Image: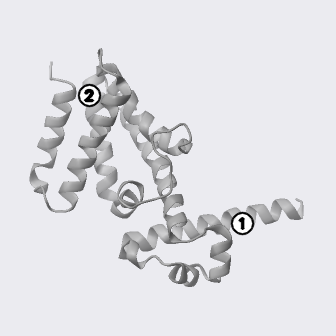
Amino acid sequence: MSIQTRRERERAERERLIITAARELAETEGWDAVTTRRLAAEIEYSQPVLYSHFKGKDAIMAAVAVQGFAELAVELSAARGTADGPRETLAAVATAYAAFAERRPALYDAMFTHAVDLPFATPEAPAALQGAFAGLLHAVEPLAGDDDPGLLTETFWSGLHGLVTLMRSGRLPREAHARRLTLLIDRFSPPR
């Protein structure tokens, strides 16, 4: 192995370490606790080493968000694989999306709530973002009929995000969450 290859591997490992530490800290203490000083202490590297990988906290949060979108895409794909029929697929994807947001609140916030410097809804969007959107699109598309599948998917996604966000913030009672998901799914795919 060449010195260059080893250095690239070590750099990638440090980057993974920074992202993992940021995620863990955000999940236990919230994003306000994630600072470059705190991360440097957590991973036992100096702040300049952190800055050699990321411009600052916002860049770290964007990297965390991209990682989250990749994980969400995998979960949505797995949910689609468990369902038979378009309505069941939509329900499985909606349930998986809501469960993801519930299990990983800080990660979800990095992806959807906090401002991050990532292009959304453009061809320049990172592959992970496009993959997560495709996970929703593949569930909505068979139900689109004459509607634009992309716009319908954006609308469905907006509904899911709104339900999840309002419930997490205590503005909607948690007890009725499953019923609200069913109502949303019914509007996009009426029961047979």
Which residue is found at the position 23% from the left and 41% from the top? 159
Q: Which labelled disc corresponds to residue 11?
A: 1
State the image coordinates of residue 90 (x, y, percent, origin top left).
29, 31
Residue 39 makes an appearance in the image: yes
Q: Quadrant of residue 41?
A: bottom right
Q: Within 10 angstroms of label 1, few (less than 14), some, or many (20 or more) residues? A: some
Q: Position of residue 91 (x, y in %)?
A: 25, 34
**Quadrant assignment, res 132:** top left
Amino acid type at image mark 2: Glu
Amino acid carrying label 1: it is: Arg
Q: Which residue is nearer to you in this view: 15 or 148? A: 148
Closer to the chain start, of discs 1 and 2, is 1
Q: Nearer the viewer, residue 10 or 169?
A: 169
Given residues 133 and 96, the one toward you in this image is 133
Point 44% across, 74% down: residue: 25
Where residue 186 appears, x then y in whole percent?
Answer: 16, 29
Image vertical order of residue 164 relative to residue 49, above or below: above
In the image shown, does 78 or 153 lie closer to the viewer? 153
CA gap between label 1 and label 2 equals 44 Å
Residue behind mark 2: 88
In-image side of 110 versus 97 (left or right): right
Q: Classify mark 2: helix, strand or loop.
A: helix
Q: Can residue 77 be seen here?
A: no
Image-based side of 14 in relation to 158, left or right: right
Q: At x 50% / y 47%, what residue is drawn?
A: 119
Which residue is at a point 81% across and 63% down the rendered structure image? 6
Residue situated furthest top in the rendering: 146
